Image (cartoon, grey):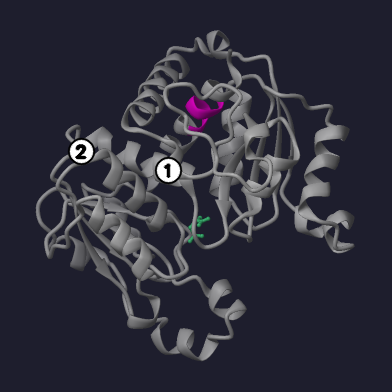
Amino acid sequence: MSVQMKNGGIPPKISGNFYGKDFIEISQLNKEDVYKIFEQAEEIREAYDSGSISDLKVNARAAILFFQNSTRTYSSFNRACQILGLDVFAEHGMSAFSLAMKGEFLRRTIQSIYQTQMLTAGDVIIMRHPDTNSSHIAASAVDASIVNAGSGSLRHPTQALLDLYTIWKDIKNLNNIELIFMGDLKFGRTVKSLGSLISMVGKNIKINLVSPDICSLPDKLREEWEEAGVKTTQTTDVLYVTRLQQEWFEKSNMMNEYNKIKADYIIDYELIKKAKNNTLLMHPLPSNGEMEDPKLDEYAGARYLNQMKNGTLVRSALIRQITKK
Ligand code: ASP
């Protein structure tokens, strides 16, 4: 429960039971929890396709609070909550709210929304924020479950779930998978959460880390994945591309470096068709020029569009698990 997070504690393990818990980082999950979400997503897909979503309804409230820009994650969580029939308050521009402008502590902002929206334990606050510890802070402030929709440049756990679900739809055995993570591995958060998730779920995973030197994956994470048995490789089942995170370069006063490397890598149809048969091409989007070729959509292994619908399904599954007794 959220209350276990008080005093900056570690978020509780899910261990088979999501109800009433916060979902903040991948380390809360075990393999069974992950497959539980995938199976629930499959059930929701079937119910949706057969027009029986009324069976999925849950009696709970949700506040969706985004302090950072988003198109896909924001609309995906909104849709997920609608599918489940949740009573939703959604605000995309939280950083422009007077609370944030006046420098109010995040803790108070979260408490305020919790009060005005008359939330209780069993309800959910879905939150995106530029600070890595934002979800932890929110979780210690209120009894509603906090779901991390992206925090800082380190965590994006629901993106990792939808990414792995997308891979699993094509490759049922998640052992012996080879992936390439390409792009900004320093500031991008999606590859970090996906690497942590796949190194926990799969055995004998190989990840090739391709990035300009100044955008390489933090050593600490690479070491953690290696400890979990991940190796590096040159071939791949999955090519997962990310954009250079211009906003983080700006924040770190590194725009000179950004301008030097920004045109360094482009994936187009001509290139991808040379890839090993069946290589899945993924991207969390947005893309900033590295994957704009419209012909890419014709590539048989293109999965970046599927990722988005899968995201809505996975998030519906997660929210249902958290809010349904
Ligand atoms: N939409 C993803 C995120 O929120 C990827 C990105 O912004 O590049 O991290």
Between 252 and 292, the one lying in front of the other is 252
From the viewer's perspective, tell me whether residue 210 is left or right of residue 24.
Answer: left
Q: Which residue is mark 2?
A: 174
Instruction: Tell me: residue 277, above or below residue 232.
Output: above
The answer to whether residue 31 shows anywhere in this view is yes
Which numbered disc, 1 or 2, marks the residue closer to the eye? 1
Between 74 and 137, the one lying in front of the other is 137
Residues at badges 1 and 2 in contact (C-beta under 8 Å)? no
* Residue 317 forms part of the magenta stretch: yes
From the image, give the main secondary structure of the stretch colored magenta: helix
Q: Which disc, if any, is residue 27?
A: 1
Q: Amino acid at mark 1?
A: Ser
- Identified at 42% across, 22% down, the residue is 16
From the viewer's perspective, tell me whether residue 302 is left or right of residue 117.
Answer: left
Residue 140 in percent (x, y) is at 70, 41
Residue 177 in percent (x, y) is at 17, 47
On the image, which quarter does residue 308 sit in? top left
Residue 235 in percent (x, y) is at 11, 60
Q: Which disc, if any, is residue 272?
A: none
Q: Which region shows up in magenta?
A: 315-319
Classify 10 Å Cα crowding around label 1: few (below 14), some (14-19), many (20 and above): some
Between 277 and 297, the one lying in front of the other is 277
Residue 112 in percent (x, y) is at 86, 41
Q: Quadrant of the N terminus?
A: top right
From the viewer's perspective, tell me whether residue 43 is left or right of residue 92.
Answer: left
Q: Amino acid at mark 2?
A: Leu
Classify 10 Å Cα crowding around label 2: few (below 14), some (14-19), many (20 and above): some
* For marks 1 and 2 on the same chain, the one whose residue lies earlier in the sequence: 1
* Residue 125 forms part of the magenta stretch: no
From the viewer's perspective, tell me whether residue 212 is left or right of residue 114.
Answer: left
On the image, which quarter does residue 271 sit in? bottom left
Instruction: Tell me: residue 315, above or below residue 286.
Output: above
